[in-house]
């Protein structure tokens, strides 16, 4: 009887231990399922968040694309306007060049080679295809400015006068673009450019000292003083750049 009781007790104990192990294993599986569930839930939340971020990004990207399209349309409109402006500027610049060329031809004959070279270079520039319209216009305005500045300056230089065997070296004096004088190196001969007949005319000896003063003032070798020199009639001073 005692042996039978012990066997029953041992069996009950073993069954109890087995139930405990099974319960423990079940709890571990439940815990694992809970972890998997939490991980899956976290991945789901992350996926939802990423989706919202992508939706927001796509919306912003669409706005950027729309703004860029509007900017491209505006640029295309501006380019079309620039092309129209260029078509209008090119003939205008050619007329400005022709006017400048005529003006130099009719002006006092000073710095003739320098001014002719400037006009020639400007003419070639206007014909050059790979130079921008802006650069052509800038150079044209620059040439106009140089010619305009001549009207506000007093200048003296040494050069040649006459042609062939009559060529002689003289000192020139320019009063703006109003008058142009010359004086021989020995000071015995002086003259002025008569714009009405486009020729040089002699000046009396009484202007010898005045011209010497004018030359010294232009060379900054003397303090400026009032010069008594012949001037053309007022009608010849009208117009110009």
Image (spheres, rainbow, N blue to C red):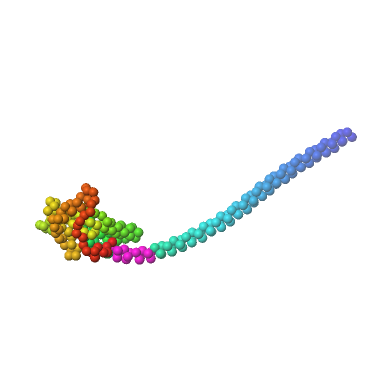
User: Where is residue 221 drawn, in percent x and y?
Assistant: 21, 47
User: Where is residue 53 drawn, in percent x and y?
Assistant: 59, 53
User: Where is residue 76 drawn, in percent x and y?
Assistant: 43, 63
- Looking at the rendering, the stretch of residues picked out in magenta corresponds to 83-97
Residue nearest the viewer, comparing 143 with 1: 143
Image point (76%, 40%), residue name: 21
Q: Residue furthest left?
A: 165
Whether residue 85 is in magenta: the answer is yes
Image point (80%, 39%), residue name: 16
Image quarter of the C terminus: bottom left
Image point (20%, 50%), residue name: 216
Q: Is residue 132 visible?
A: no
Q: Is residue 135 left or right of residue 54?
A: left
Q: Residue furthest top?
A: 2
Image quarter of the N terminus: top right
Q: Is residue 23 visible?
A: yes
The main secondary structure of the magenta stretch is: helix
Q: Is residue 86 left or right of residue 50?
A: left
Q: Is residue 8 left or right of residue 45?
A: right
User: Where is residue 199 drawn, in percent x and y?
Assistant: 16, 62
Q: How many marks?
A: 0
Image point (68%, 47%), residue name: 38
Q: Residue furthest right?
A: 1
Q: Is residue 182 above or below residue 10?
A: below
Whether residue 82 is in magenta: the answer is no
Q: Is residue 93 above or below residue 17?
A: below
- Quadrant for residue 119, please give it: bottom left
Residue nearest the viewer, comparing 136 with 206: 206
Residue nearest the viewer, comparing 224 with 71: 224
């Amino acid at each position: 009887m005692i042996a039978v009781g012990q066997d029953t007790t041992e069996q009950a104990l073993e069954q109890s231990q087995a139930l405990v192990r099974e319960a423990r294993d079940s709890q571990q599986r439940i815990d694992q399922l809970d972890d998997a569930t939490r991980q899956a839930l976290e991945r789901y939340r992350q996926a939802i968040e990423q989706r919202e971020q992508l939706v927001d990004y796509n919306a912003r990207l669409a706005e950027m694309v729309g703004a860029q399209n509007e900017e491209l349309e505006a640029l295309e409109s501006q380019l079309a306007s620039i092309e129209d402006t260029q078509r209008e500027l090119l003939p205008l610049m050619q007329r400005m060049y022709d006017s400048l060329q005529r003006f130099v031809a009719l002006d006092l004959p000073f710095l003739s080679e320098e001014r002719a070279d400037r006009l020639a270079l400007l003419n070639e520039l206007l014909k050059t295809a790979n130079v921008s319209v802006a650069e052509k216009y800038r150079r044209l305005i620059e040439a106009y400015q140089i010619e305009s500045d001549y009207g506000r300056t007093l200048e003296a230089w040494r050069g040649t006068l006459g042609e062939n065997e009559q060529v002689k070296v003289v000192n020139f004096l320019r009063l703006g673009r109003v008058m142009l004088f010359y004086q021989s190196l020995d000071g015995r001969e002086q003259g002025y450019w008569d714009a009405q007949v486009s020729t040089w005319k002699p000046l009396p000896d009484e202007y010898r000292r005045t011209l010497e003063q004018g030359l010294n003032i232009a060379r900054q070798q003397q303090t400026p003083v009032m010069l008594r020199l012949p001037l053309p009639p007022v009608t010849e001073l009208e117009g110009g750049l």
